[in-house]
Image: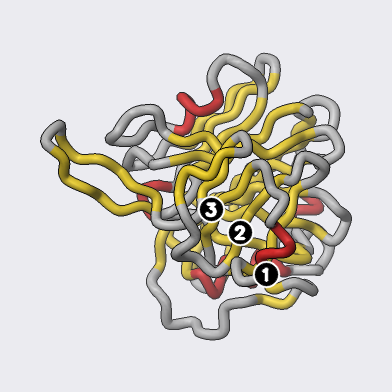
Amino acid sequence: MLAAAEAPWKDLGPGARSLDLRVEYGDQNHRLFATIFDPARWRLRVAPAFEPDGFRVDAALGKGEGLAVNGGYFDYRDTPNGRTLVPTGLVIADGSRLSGYRGGSGVLFDTGKGIGIAWAKDRKAWSGAVEALQVGPLLVDPGGQPGIRRQDGPRARRSAVCATAEGEIAVVVVTSAISLYDFAEVLADTSPGGFACERAINLDGGPSTQVFGRFGKTVIDLPGGSRVVNAVVFERR
């Protein structure tokens, strides 16, 4: 389905590699970008925006090496000083709870010992997280089965984080409009070259979809169409 096995993976240094290819799915051709990390070498950090109107994810990465991708959903709140972006689900950053549990079917988290994806209602799974972001839906349910049952949803740019059957963590972004159903099928694909996600969670999509990475002299820049309220950052442990 993906033919990713034949695509050239780019080495980004110890425990990281990336892929940029064209994917034919259904009647459309999509650009798909992925970065795969070894969670023994890389950690997840939730970076909240330091400006009330949000930020671009390159600001979340700073000057170090790693990769930043758009994070969770948000609402707009009007204040005397202008419009403020407010997260709509659980946000834990550096051990501090910045926003409460109230929306999104799953939680992406790092306990300090490893990165996980769990149902939001399974609080025991993520209760010890030092970094956590409530988002969703789960695109691939635990066990590797696609989690989206209907094909009639809207199409948009998409981003997701996937835990593979090999124990790696993948950030996967499609920069053209695709349905959640099709995206879930791509992530769950176990054919040669497929991602074979054991579970995967959807991040905020549409114009929020954006990635910025820096690995030595390699720079990855997939700009989005809007500012975001937080970002998911992968950096060396």
Q: Residues within 10 Å of mark 3 (few under 14, many from 20)?
A: many
Q: Quadrant of the N terminus?
A: bottom right
Q: Position of residue 4 (x, y in %)?
A: 74, 53
Q: Amino acid at mark 1?
A: Asp
The reply, left or right, for residue 167 in relation to residue 17 is right
Q: Which of the 4 quarters of the picture holds residue 94? A: top right
Identified by mark 2, the residue type is: Val
Mark 2 → mark 1, Cα distance in angstroms:
9 Å
Q: Relative to 162, is 221 above or below?
A: above
Image coordinates for residue 25, horizontal then vertical, percent: 57, 68
Which one is nearer the viewer's eye here, 117 or 161?
A: 117
In which quadrant of the rendered image does the C terminus lie?
Answer: top right
Q: Tell me the distance, in whole angstroms, between the alpha carbons under discs 2 and 3.
A: 15 Å
Element type where label 2 sits in the image: strand
Q: Nearer the viewer, residue 36 or 177?
A: 36
Q: Is residue 198 above or below residue 81?
A: below
Give the labeled residue for mark 2: 107
Which residue bears the numbered disc 1? 122
Can residue 15 be spotted in the picture?
yes
